[in-house]
Amino acid sequence: MRRFLLCASALVAVLGAAVIAQGKIAGAEDYAQMMKANAQAAGAMNKAIGSGAFADARTQVATLRTNYMALQGFWSEKKKDDAVGIVKDGLTRLDALDKLLGAATVDQMAAQAAGKEFGGATCGACHKLYREGDAQSGFKFKAGVL
């Protein structure tokens, strides 16, 4: 399991770095790639927390934080203040989760709750405003967003 998480982390980092290396998210295709990387990182983070691999979870939190910084730039450029607010809220939640995971004695239940809350509050809020579709058929921007 640990080997899987490390490999998944590396893949997410490479995918996210490819987009971020450009300095910004160029369009819908880069955005979709970033969202896939975020979904993988969040899933790996939650699995790591569940298995007690808190250092691995912090690696995923760092990946998410880096990606969210790029998202903040993307939405700022699009002048979508509500999306910028959602991303900033997500960054605040990631910082709080990272603090929980970095404690001398990690409260696993609190970390699991914070991880789930991050996904629901941040990802869910943005998807509700700007996206349509589902995990089966795929997500796309609602008409007029970009």
Image (spheres, grey):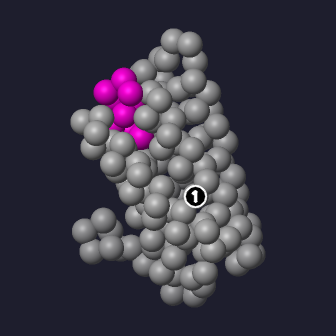
Q: Nearer the viewer, residue 85 or 67?
A: 67
Q: Residue at x 57, y 24 (%)?
A: 102
Residue furthest bottom as drawn: 144
- Graded by Cα atoms within 10 Å as few (under 14), some (14 to 19) or many (20 or more), the crowding at tag 1 reads many
51 is within the stretch colored magenta: yes
Residue 31: image x %, image y %?
52, 73
Q: Residue at x 41, y 52 (%)?
A: 10
Q: Residue at x 55, y 70 (%)?
A: 19
Q: Dot 1: what SS?
A: helix
Vertical placement of residue 141 versus 82, above or below: below
Q: Which residue is mark 1?
A: 67
**Residue 2 appears in the rendering:** yes
Left or right placement of residue 60 versus residue 21 in this view: left
Image position, residue 115 (x, y; %):
47, 38
Q: Is residue 124 visible?
A: no
Magenta-colored span = 45-53
Viewport quadrant of the C terminus: bottom right
Q: Inspect the magenta stretch and tell me whether residue 9 lies in it.
A: no
